[in-house]
């Protein structure tokens, strides 16, 4: 039954976009060389091409003559529940959907989006790992996977406003910009909220928070469920409509940016003329236009490097902005890791992996590639613009007992604002 | 049937049939995929989709035939990069710029073009054959390739390998009389032509889809594909 | 014909010993006794392969000619043009060809015989009887066995019967020219007479094929000289051709070969390339796949051969050369290509089947979506 549901979804999702890319695959296995999970563990089942194996098999068996012949000859077997369970572990616990594999693929197959299709089938079939599903359900019920209910949100924001002495405008009608934080920032990195508030204030932005649209994270998108992805997107867009803002700023969260900026338009009605941007893009614009001034060379002690997040840099396009900012803040100490920018190696915690306890060995193994990179440049501080990466870095720095400071870019900017 | 008659068969009716199967089969594959429907992309772009797609093609064509260049991946799987690139380079030079093949194109299309001196074509052909052997061994050894290779993958390698080897032997008149070699070469080519639409060798057609999708997706986000 | 040896006959006609030895040298050369590979091919014992072999070879030839009588030859013509006979009789290398021809007696030849009609036929019968088991049968032209051989008859006898009759008493058979060897022009599509080569009919006698259109006279006389000296046919390749003369392609020994290697081709008969003597491959030259001695022995006494004089090789010594693709079309080009209508039909078929498959697949998608909805 589970199998049938999953296959139905695969069949349903397979249009020209999926089919043409599945047909293009030459089975060269090159994608594996881009995957941090395969690189770190050497497990061939972590090869991206293997993660879309069921989608490919369903396509061949249901849509192509060759597939039907193969099935009849016994070269290929029907997909079973066991297959699904087996692949569920691979697709959720060993993939951050970072899409680096698509850059290595000689055919340019968009493996990330295809793996997302696989997750969609699995989520409908109820094969999402328990930890991730628990978080999804929490977001459905409480509005946040980390338990940020209305009252928690209010308390927390009040506390942040007091603690850091910043203004946090709430539900201000007539504001230009709605800023939505992720629950990771609210619960684990509250200083980020204060930092961003400071920056927005300095730039003279007319902005507001919303109680209704208080959670930018979209666990439905991690899981691959279109239903719940839409539900969480609409919570934010409803707030946009209620407040009538023109601009939506996604704070330091990568997956949310991918969902809101690059996916929502194809899933739900996005309020007309709404500009969706990321805080990194906004800061870059502020710096370029002179709306905020930064203390040049404020972080010139100790080597500092920048970690590119898969969803904000490679899949978001905000590659230049953080570098512009860091070249002002730390012109002497800023050093690039290799590979970097769109070719960067993923942190290993994205795509919901960090929410799944069973995936910890994979996550730690993948992070060792990152440790290598940091060691090579001798980084004392590593900066990033995604709080999911930051969570993974913070956890791994502790786990591996590293002497590296993990910092959010917004906070560094806020601390270096020229009064 | 002697070899001369067999040659006339493989160069004549069989080739004709193979060509028609190839054309009909490729069109069938194309139509089947294209008519599955395309969801329009409503996401507002930050960069140029067309520009991204062009960059994506150029990167594939220029750096090393059809192999994109991404840091820290070459050293991990150099055989696929080098042999894969050399194979495609050799293949395309031989079948387009080899004089004997150009005459085939000319007879089919009605026009021809200048060709390369034989030694260049010959060495590239030899390179492509060696590359195929390397790819074959790599598929036997590499854990990922072992996992994802089924009977179809092995068959594909063999079906592509045979015309290349028989063509090389034909050029050098190796071991067998020429009509035997010519017949075998034509037979292998005919089999290949019929096999392409049934297999993943047809990737050269879908290459233009996937590369364009990839390029547009990255271009849309203002990222280099 | 007398019973004297060839040497004695030659002496009678005024040939000196010195001239005779020179002739022996020529014959030895013609049958390829002068260098190693052909020596082996001609069946010469291995002990002759060494220093001074040339002298030994000449002595060997001289010994044979001093002891053997002139060789009786019966020459039959079937579906032919007499071009091979023409080439032989008009050969520009009289010293060799004429001298070899002097060592044989042509007992019967339709074109050359002074006699005609029943007289000639009777002479043939007499010769076949007298030299039964000794004579060499030369066949020029293809055989038409179709419908009992009625498409080619001489004196009321079908060519099939004539061939079988003459072959029965022959010591060996030489098929001269492409027609006798492989069926030649008469065999070209649609082959109305069902033409075939000699060795497809006569299988119980040694048959040597000397294909070419016509056969190179020096090759023909070479084979004859070989039989004269050794009493047997030379070593043959898989198509029954003497290896001595058919071991290499025209391309292998072509004087325009360097241009081929360098990729310099004439693209028409009057372009710069043609004037500069570049390779004729693109003008349809079949040299790379044609085994013959044109490029080495050449024609008209070693003066030239087609490729040298500016015309691509037609491949006339290969089986099926008339149907093996256009003369001026590339040697590698396919023999036939689908016309536009057929290609169009294939495209339409592809579109129809593809669209059909796609309709079925889209229906699957819809039903999957419907099932999915029901579950929700």
Image (spheres, rainbow, N blue to C red):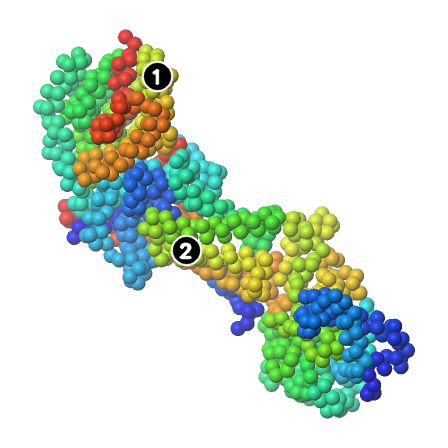
Quadrant hosting residue A79:
bottom left
Query: Is A264 drawn above or below residue C60 in the view shown?
Result: above
Query: Is C245 drawn above or below residue A154 in the view shown?
Result: below
Which structural element holds mark 1?
A: loop
Quadrant hosting residue C89:
bottom right
- Residue occupying the point 36% across, 41% down: A33
Can residue A190 be seen by looking at this rendering? yes
Q: Position of residue C144 (x, y in %)?
A: 63, 80
Q: Nearer the viewer, mark 2 or mark 1?
A: 1
Q: Position of residue A377 (x, y in %)?
A: 36, 25
Q: Which residue is mark 2?
A: B156
Can residue A315 be seen by looking at this rendering? no
Quadrant hosting residue C325:
bottom right
Pick the front one: A355 or A23: A355
Pick the front one: C209 or A3: C209
Quote the CA–CA distance across marks 2 and 1: 54 Å
Chain ID for label 1? Answer: A
- Residue occupying the point 75% across, 82% down: C73
Asked if residue B112 lies left or right of residue C127, the reply is left
Asked if residue C337 lies left or right of residue A339, the reply is right
Q: Position of residue B168 (x, y in %)?
A: 55, 56
Pick the front one: C71 or A405: A405
- Residue occupying the point 37% across, 38% down: A103
Pick the front one: B221 or A182: A182
- Residue occupying the point 32% across, 39% down: A39
Chain ID for label 2? Answer: B
Disc sitting over residue A330 in the figure: 1
Asked if residue A146 lies left or right of residue C296, the reply is left
Q: Position of residue C1 (x, y in %)?
A: 82, 87
Q: Residues within 10 Å of mark 2 (few under 14, many from 20)?
A: some
């Amino acid at each position: 039954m589970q199998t049938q549901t999953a296959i139905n979804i695969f069949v349903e999702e397979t249009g020209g976009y999926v089919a043409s890319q599945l047909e293009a695959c030459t089975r060269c296995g090159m994608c594996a060389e881009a995957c941090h999970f395969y690189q770190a563990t050497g497990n061939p089942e972590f090869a991206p091409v293997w993660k879309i194996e069921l989608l490919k098999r369903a396509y061949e068996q249901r849509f192509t003559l060759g597939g039907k012949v193969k099935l009849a000859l016994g070269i290929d077997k029907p997909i079973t529940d066991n297959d699904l369970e087996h692949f569920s572990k691979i697709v959720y616990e060993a993939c951050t959907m970072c899409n680096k594999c698509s850059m290595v693929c000689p055919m340019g197959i968009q493996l990330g989006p295809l793996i997302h299709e696989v997750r969609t089938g699995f989520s409908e079939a109820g094969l999402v790992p328990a930890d991730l599903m628990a978080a999804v359900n929490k977001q459905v019920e409480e509005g946040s996977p980390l338990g940020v209910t209305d009252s928690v949100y209010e308390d927390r924001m009040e506390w942040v406003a007091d603690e850091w002495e910043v203004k946090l405008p709430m539900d201000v009608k007539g504001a230009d910009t709605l800023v939505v934080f992720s629950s990771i920032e609210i619960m684990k990195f509250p200083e980020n909220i204060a930092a961003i508030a400071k920056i927005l204030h300095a730039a003279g932005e007319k902005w507001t928070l919303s109680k209704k649209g208080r959670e930018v994270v979209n666990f439905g998108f991690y899981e691959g469920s279109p239903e719940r992805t839409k539900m969480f997107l609409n919570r934010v867009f409803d707030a946009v409509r209620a407040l009538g803002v023109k601009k939506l700023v996604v704070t330091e969260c990568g997956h949310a940016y991918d969902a809101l900026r690059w996916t929502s338009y194809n899933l739900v009605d996005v309020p007309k003329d709404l500009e969706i941007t990321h805080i990194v893009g906004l800061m870059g614009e502020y710096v370029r236009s002179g709306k905020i001034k930064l203390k040049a060379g404020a972080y010139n002690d100790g080597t500092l490097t920048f970690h590119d997040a898969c969803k904000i840099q490679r899949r978001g396009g905000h590659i230049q902005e953080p570098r512009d900012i860091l070249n002002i803040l730390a012109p002497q100490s800023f050093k690039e890791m290799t590979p970097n920018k769109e070719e960067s190696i993923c942190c290993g915690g994205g795509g919901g992996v960090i929410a799944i306890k069973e995936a910890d060995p994979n996550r730690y193994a993948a992070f060792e590639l990152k440790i290598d990179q940091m060691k090579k440049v001798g980084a004392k501080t590593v900066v990033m613009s995604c709080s999911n990466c930051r969570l993974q870095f913070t956890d791994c720095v502790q786990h591996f007992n590293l002497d590296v400071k993990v910092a959010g870019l917004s906070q560094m900017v806020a601390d270096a604002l020229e009064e | 049937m002697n070899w001369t008659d067999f040659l006339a068969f493989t160069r004549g009716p069989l080739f004709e049939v193979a060509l028609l199967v190839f054309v009909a089969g490729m069109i069938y594959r194309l139509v089947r995929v294209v008519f599955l429907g395309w969801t329009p992309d409503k996401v507002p772009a930050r960069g140029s989709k067309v520009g991204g797609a062009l960059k994506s093609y150029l990167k594939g064509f220029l750096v090393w035939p059809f192999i994109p260049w991404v840091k820290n991946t070459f050293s991990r799987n150099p055989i696929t990069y080098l042999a894969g690139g050399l194979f495609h380079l050799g293949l395309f030079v031989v079948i387009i710029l080899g004089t004997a093949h150009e005459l085939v194109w000319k007879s089919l299309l009605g026009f021809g073009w200048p060709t390369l001196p034989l030694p260049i074509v010959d060495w590239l052909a030899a390179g492509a054959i060696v590359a195929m052997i390397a790819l074959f061994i790599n598929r036997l050894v590499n854990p990922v390739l072992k996992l994802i290779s089924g009977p179809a993958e092995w068959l594909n390698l063999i079906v592509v390998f045979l015309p290349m080897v028989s063509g090389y032997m034909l050029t050098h008149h190796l071991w067998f009389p020429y009509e035997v070699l010519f017949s075998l070469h034509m037979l292998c080519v005919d089999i290949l032509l019929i096999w392409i639409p049934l297999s993943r060798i047809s990737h050269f057609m879908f290459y233009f889809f996937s590369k364009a999708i990839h390029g547009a997706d990255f271009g849309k986000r203002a990222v280099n594909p | 014909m007398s019973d004297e040896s060839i040497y004695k006959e030659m002496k009678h006609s005024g040939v000196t010993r010195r001239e005779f030895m020179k002739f022996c040298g020529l014959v030895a050369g013609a049958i390829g006794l002068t260098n190693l590979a052909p020596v082996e091919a001609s069946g010469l014992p291995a002990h002759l392969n060494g220093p001074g072999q040339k002298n030994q070879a000449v002595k060997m030839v001289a010994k044979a000619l001093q002891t053997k009588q002139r060789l009786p030859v019966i020459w039959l013509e079937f579906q032919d043009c007499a071009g091979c006979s023409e080439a032989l009789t008009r050969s520009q290398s009289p010293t060799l060809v004429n001298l070899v021809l002097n060592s044989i007696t042509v007992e019967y030849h339709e074109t050359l015989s002074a006699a005609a009609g029943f007289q000639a036929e009777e002479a043939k019968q007499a010769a076949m009887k007298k030299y039964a088991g000794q004579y060499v049968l030369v066949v020029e032209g293809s055989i038409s066995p179709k419908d009992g051989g009625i498409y080619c008859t001489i004196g009321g006898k079908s060519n099939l019967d004539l061939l079988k009759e003459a072959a029965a008493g022959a010591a060996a058979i030489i098929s001269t020219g492409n027609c006798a060897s492989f069926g030649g022009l008469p065999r070209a599509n649609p082959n109305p007479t069902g033409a075939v080569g000699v060795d497809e009919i006569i299988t119980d006698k040694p048959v040597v094929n000397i294909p070419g259109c016509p056969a190179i006279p020096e090759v023909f006389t070479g084979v004859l000289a070989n039989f004269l000296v050794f009493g047997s046919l030379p070593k043959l390749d898989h198509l029954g051709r003497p290896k001595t003369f058919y071991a290499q392609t025209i391309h292998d020994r072509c004087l325009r070969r360097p241009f081929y290697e360098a990729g310099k081709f004439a693209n028409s008969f009057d372009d710069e390339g043609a004037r500069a003597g570049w390779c004729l491959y693109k003008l349809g030259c079949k040299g790379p796949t044609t085994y013959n001695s044109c490029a080495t022995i050449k024609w008209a006494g070693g003066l030239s051969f087609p490729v040298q004089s500016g015309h691509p090789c037609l491949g006339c010594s290969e089986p099926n050369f008339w149907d093996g693709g256009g003369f001026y079309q590339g040697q590698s080009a396919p023999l036939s290509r689908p016309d536009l209508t057929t290609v169009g039909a294939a495209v339409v078929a592809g579109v129809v089947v593809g669209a059909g498959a796609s309709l079925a697949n889209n229906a699957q998608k819809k039903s999957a979506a419907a099932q999915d909805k029901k579950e929700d």
